[in-house]
Structure formats: C-alpha cells, structure tokens
Amino acid sequence: MIGVSLGRVRHWYAGTEYCIDDLGIKTEKQGSGAGTEFLRQIETFLRERGIKRITLKTNKNAPAYYFYKKNGFIEAQQDVFFAKEVE
C-alpha cells in the first residue's frame, strides 16, 4: 500500500460529495506522481457512484496546498473556517 484516503460521503444541499479528511502517500513515493494517480482512482470510483464533488480542508502553508492546486482543486472563496478555544 502506498496511499490512503480517509473521508466520508456527505449528502449536502448541493448534492452528494466526498469529504477528504486525510490523504497520505508513502514518503518515498511522494513526488513520483503516485498521489496524482491515487486521486484519479478516487475520482473514477466516485464518478461510478454518481458522486460529483470532492471537498477538503488544508493549510495554505502546507505542501499539500500546492499538490491539490496542481491537481485541479479550486479554493472555495465562499467557505469560511471557524475555530473557538474552549476554556
């Protein structure tokens, strides 16, 4: 195994989508196209099941940010991430 995607299918007002919580590729396989191929396989799997959207959250300072942009993901300007400290 060289990669794993952990997520969930969510039925949303805009349709059914796959939300990636975590996606990882074995360190020695990163940069070889393995992650891109893995995403293509995920997309094929989802397309066959009628799921037309993938969503995820990542940090703009993380290498993953550029990986997702390179693979056709678009920043959703309308979405906002909220956080609150519970003391």
Image (cartoon, grey):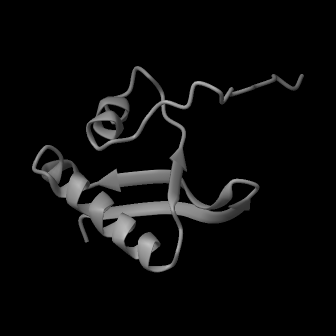
* Residue 67 horizontal side relative to residue 4, left or right: left
Look at the picture and state if 44 lies above or below 31.
below
80 left or right of 53? right
Judging depth in this view, the residue of 80 and 47 nearest the camera is 47
- Nearest the camera: 41 or 52? 52
Residue 8, given in percent of the width and then of the height, sits at 61, 64
Identify which residue is drawn at 44% across, 22% down: 60
- Tell me the residue at 37%/31% (across/down): 65
Q: In the shown orientation, is residue 51 left or right of residue 27?
A: right
Quadrant of the image occupied by residue 69: top left
The image shows residue 1, relative to residue 19, as above or below, that is: below
Q: Quadrant of the C terminus?
A: top right
**For the view shown, which residue lies furthest in the right direction?**
87
Q: Is 43 positioned to the left or the right of 84 in the image?
A: left
Q: Position of residue 84 (x, y in %)?
A: 81, 23
Q: Is residue 15 above or below residue 84?
A: below
Residue at image location 76% in from the left, 55% down from the top: 13
* Residue occupying the far left of the picture: 32
Pinpoint residue 34: horizontal percent, then vertical percent: 18, 57
Tell me the quarter of the picture where residue 61 sits: top left
